[in-house]
Image: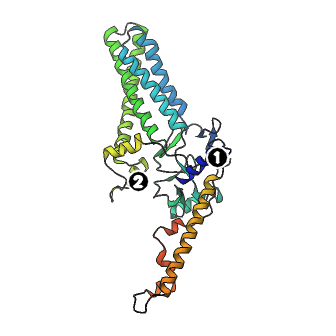
């Protein structure tokens, strides 16, 4: 949007440009010199290291023990590639800011029970691409674990230790799919070894243990991957599916299976709304609000002039004449009215 164009122009002009993330939002804290915004959650909510161990250890046993004695190079290469893909997708889902949104009012401007009451009554709005909209319009939700409003909220996944939203959804789907395929590949390699070499050695015992483990992981993660792929094909989030949001009305976001998959899995991830230039996002929103105020002022003058010069015979609503500003108010004008935007931060 215009916000990012302005930031790019600042960089072209040689103005100082700081690290991408500088402030904590909810439990998300800047990391890697401000390049990442990582959820600072601990066990049992965060099981990312457990997931890494459950992926690396069995794959390492297969590649380093079983496949060493009777290598099937196609399976070995495929297993190694899926291992790298699975770990990469997990780290991307973990380290990618999921789509945090600024709320109006700010979460830290009131107590937690008061804010929950505001959310329940629909008073909380969020900024999406410089537009003030409701949580439902942004498909957003206040994540309980991260204490943030997240656009197109899917769910909080303990295995990646992060909420899944619009910016890291495809990495999560890639993670569960590649992990399921990795388990199947390890299962195939171990079954081949047991069928060819038997269980007479320590390697055979390791292989049969990996067979049992891979069957369990394939069933669990495989069913999860199928479930999420089905949601992707319908362009429905887990949160919407649990709440049955589209049971009584058609899904307005469903563009067909192919387009939905391209949009979610193949499209470019939008930039983060947590600006790289400190205060620039809020400054640009203020500019937008001033422009909207000026446009509304000009439109109001035009309407008042039209009412003044209208003929007596022209049909005029008494309500419109007494309050001509009602004529120019759009259905979404209430959402577009300027608000004081406060960047909410969770401080411990």
Circles 1 and 2: CB atoms closer than 8 Å: no
Does residue 57 appear anywhere in the picture? Answer: yes
Q: Is residue 226 left or right of residue 131?
A: left
Residue 112: x, y in percent?
Answer: 61, 56
The residue shown at (51%, 78%) is: 302
Can you tell which quarter of the image residue 311 is in?
bottom left
Q: Is residue 123 above or below residue 19?
A: below
Residue 130 percent coordinates (x, y) = 54, 57
Q: Residue under circle 1?
A: 13
Q: Position of residue 180 (x, y in %)?
A: 39, 30
- Between 269 and 99, the one lying in front of the other is 269
Q: Is residue 278 left or right of residue 58?
A: right
Q: Which residue is mark 2?
A: 243
Q: CA distance from mark 1 to mark 2?
A: 48 Å
The residue sitting at 34% across, 9% down in the picture is 198
Q: Which residue reaches farthest front?
A: 13
- Judged left or right of residue 283, residue 315 is left
Question: Nearer the viewer's eye, disc 1 or disc 2?
Answer: 1
Can you tell which mark lies on residue 291? none
Identify the residue shown where x is 57% and y is 46%. 146
Q: Secondary structure at mark 1?
A: loop
Mark 2 closeness class: few <14, some 14–19, many ≥20 residues within 10 Å: few
The image shows residue 67 at horizontal and vertical percentages of 41, 13
Task: Give the quadrant of residue 344.
Answer: bottom right
Depth order, front residue of 153/254: 254
């Amino acid at each position: 949007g215009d916000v990012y164009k302005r930031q790019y122009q600042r960089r072209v002009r040689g103005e100082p440009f700081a690290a991408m993330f500088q402030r904590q939002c909810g439990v998300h804290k800047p990391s890697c010199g401000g390049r990442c915004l990582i959820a600072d959650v601990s066990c049992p909510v965060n099981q990312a290291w457990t997931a890494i161990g459950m992926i690396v250890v069995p794959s390492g046993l297969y590649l380093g023990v079983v496949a060493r004695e009777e290598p099937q190079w196609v399976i070995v290469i495929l297993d190694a590639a899926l291992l790298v893909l699975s770990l990469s997708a997990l780290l991307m889902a973990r380290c990618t800011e999921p789509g945090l949104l600024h709320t109006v009012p700010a979460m830290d401007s009131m107590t937690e029970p008061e804010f929950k009451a505001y959310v329940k009554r629909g008073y909380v709005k969020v900024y999406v691409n410089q537009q003030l909209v409701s949580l439902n319009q942004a498909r957003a939700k206040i994540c309980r674990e991260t204490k943030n409003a997240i656009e197109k909220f899917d769910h909080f996944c303990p295995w990646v230790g992060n909420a899944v939203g619009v910016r890291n959804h495809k990495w999560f789907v890639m993670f569960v799919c590649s992990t399921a395929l990795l388990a199947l590949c390890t299962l195939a390699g171990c079954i081949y070894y047991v069928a060819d070499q038997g269980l007479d050695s320590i390697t055979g015992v390791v292989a049969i243990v990996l067979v049992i483990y891979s069957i369990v992981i394939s069933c669990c993660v495989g069913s999860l991957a199928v479930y999420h792929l089905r949601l992707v094909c319908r362009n429905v989030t887990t949160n919407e599916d649990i709440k049955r949001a589209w049971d009584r009305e058609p899904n307005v976001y469903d563009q067909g299976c192919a387009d939905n998959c391209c949009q979610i899995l193949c499209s470019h991830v939008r930039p983060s709304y947590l600006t790289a230039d400190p205060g620039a996002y809020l400054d640009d929103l203020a500019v937008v609000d001033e422009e909207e105020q000026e446009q509304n002022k000009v439109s109001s003058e035009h309407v008042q002039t039209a009412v003044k010069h209208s003929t007596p015979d022209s049909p005029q609503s008494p309500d419109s004449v007494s309050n001509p500003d009602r004529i120019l108010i759009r259905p979404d004008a209430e959402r577009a009215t300027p608000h004081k935007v406060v960047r909410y931060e969770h401080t411990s």
